[in-house]
Image (tube, rainbow, N blue to C red):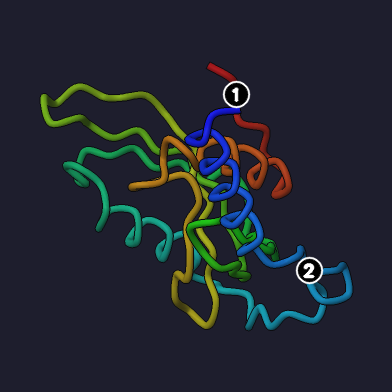
Amino acid sequence: MSARLAAALVALASLAACQGPPLTTEQIAALDYGPRPENYEQLVRDYLRSRLNEPSFALIEIKAGPTRLYQADTLSRRHENGWAACAMVNERDPRGAYIGFYPVVIYIREGKVVAMDGGGAERALGLRYAHAQCAKLGYEVPRS
C-alpha cells in the first residue's frame, strides 16, 4: 500500500470518528420539537424563495408534513430536529430554463426554519438523504 493511500485512509478514519453515535429511539423521542407550526407552508415557501435563483418563477410543491422528524449527524453538520415538511422544487437556472424538480426537507422549530436537506450547497450530496427523509414523511420521490 502506498504511503499516500495509507495517509488518506487514516484521514478518512479520523473524520468518521468525529461523527457521534446515532441517537437511540428513546433519545429521539425525548427531543424538543416545539409546537406544531400552523403556518408551516408559508415558512417553507419563504425560506426556499430566499435561497432560489429567480424565486418568483420557482415552483414549490409541498408534498408531506409537518411531522416530527430527526435529522442525523453528518460530517458537515450536527443533527437537528423539528417539524419537517417535504417539498419538491423546480427553479430556473441562470439562463432561465427550469432544471427539474428535486426534493428538499425543511425542519421547523419554534416558528423558525432550523435546517434543510437537499438544497443549496449540499444539493448534490443531500439529494439521497432528502429522498429518504421525504419517504419517512410519507412521500416517495419519483426517480428520474
Q: Position of residue 102 (x, y in %)?
A: 45, 33
Q: Amino acid at mark 1?
A: Pro
Residue at image point 32% right, 61% down: 46
Q: How many marks?
A: 2
Quadrant occupied by the N terminus: top right
Q: CA distance from mark 1 to mark 2?
A: 29 Å
Element class at badge 1: loop
Q: Amino acid at mark 2?
A: Leu
Residue at image point 53% right, 51% down: 105
| Residue closest to the eye, 64 or 31 | 31
Q: Which mark is residue 23?
A: 2
Tell me if residue 46 comes above or below residue 102 in the rendering.
below
Q: Residue furthest left?
A: 95
Residue at image point 50% right, 63% down: 77
| Residue closest to the eye, 87 or 25 | 25
User: Is 10 left, or right, of 99 in this rendering?
Assistant: right
Tell me if residue 2 comes above or below residue 19 in the rendering.
above
> Which badge, 1 or 2, comes first in the chain's sequence?
2
Q: Quadrant of residue 6?
A: top right
Tell me if residue 70 comes above or below residue 137 in the rendering.
below
Residue picked out by circle 1: 142
User: Is 1 left, or right, of 8 in this rendering?
Assistant: right
